[in-house]
Image (tube, rainbow, N blue to C red):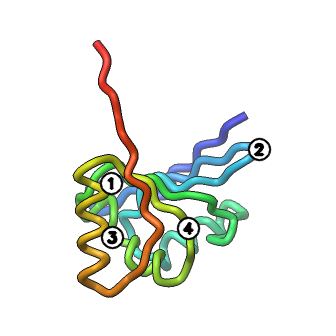
């Protein structure tokens, strides 16, 4: 079974927690690191429970909390193409190390 917990969903920030028997994933981290950790605590989780972060795209309302999350945790970050490249460059400019994995995507008709 998969549980989806919308932590934040608005033009000022987006973040969702996806929980299964085997993993806890954050989909986007568009709010502050503190808001993310507080929201996880409210649903009975800790940032240490997170096994991966998936970033849908590089708008600030989807990546705002990423720099501090990467500084404080060694959680793998997954993103496609140009989004992964943008994140890598942005974090590199801020001297932040991050485990980012560039994924591929396919479109089907």
Q: Nearer the viewer, mark 4 or mark 1?
A: 4
Residue at point 36%, 40% (across, down): 104
Mark toward the start of the polypeptide (4 vs 1): 1
State the CA–CA distance, disc 4 to disc 1: 24 Å
User: Alpha-carbon neighbours of circle 2 within 10 Å: few (<14), some, or many (≥20)?
Assistant: few
**Residue 20 sits above or below residue 105 on the image:** below
Q: Read off the residue under disc 1.
A: 10
Q: Position of residue 61 (x, y in %)?
A: 29, 61
Residue 67, quarter of picture = bottom left
Residue 30 in the figure: left or right of residue 44? left
Q: Residue furthest bottom?
A: 95
Q: Which residue is mark 3?
A: 64
Asked if disc 4 and disc 3 are in contact, CB closer than 8 Å, the reply is no
Mark 4 = which residue? 75
> Quadrant location of residue 60?
bottom left
Q: Are the residues tagged 4 and 1 within 8 Å (C-beta)?
A: no
Q: Which mark is residue 66?
A: none
Residue 73 on image: x %, y %: 56, 77
Say which element carries label 4.
loop
**Of 4 and 55, the residue lying toward us:** 55
Q: Earlier in the sequence, mark 2 or mark 1?
A: 1
Image quadrant holding the C terminus, namely top left
Q: CA distance from mark 2 to mark 3?
A: 28 Å
Residue drawn at x 68%, y 50% as measured from the top left: 23
Q: Earlier in the sequence, mark 3 or mark 1?
A: 1
Query: Mark 4 to mark 2: distance in Å?
Result: 18 Å
What residue is disc 2 on?
21
Q: Earlier in the sequence, mark 4 or mark 2?
A: 2
Query: Viewed as shown, does residue 74 lie left or right of 109?
Result: right
């Amino acid at each position: 079974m998969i549980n989806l917990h919308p932590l934040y969903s608005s033009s000022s920030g987006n973040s969702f927690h996806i929980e299964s028997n085997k993993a806890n994933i954050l989909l986007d981290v568009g709010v502050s690191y503190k808001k993310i950790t507080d929201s996880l605590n409210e649903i009975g989780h800790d940032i240490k429970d997170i096994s991966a972060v998936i970033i849908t795209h590089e708008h600030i309302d989807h990546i705002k909390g990423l720099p501090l999350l990467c500084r404080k945790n060694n959680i793998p970050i997954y993103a496609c193409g140009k989004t992964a490249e943008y994140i890598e460059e942005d974090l590199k400019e801020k001297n932040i190390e991050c485990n980012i994995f560039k994924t591929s995507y396919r479109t089907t008709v």
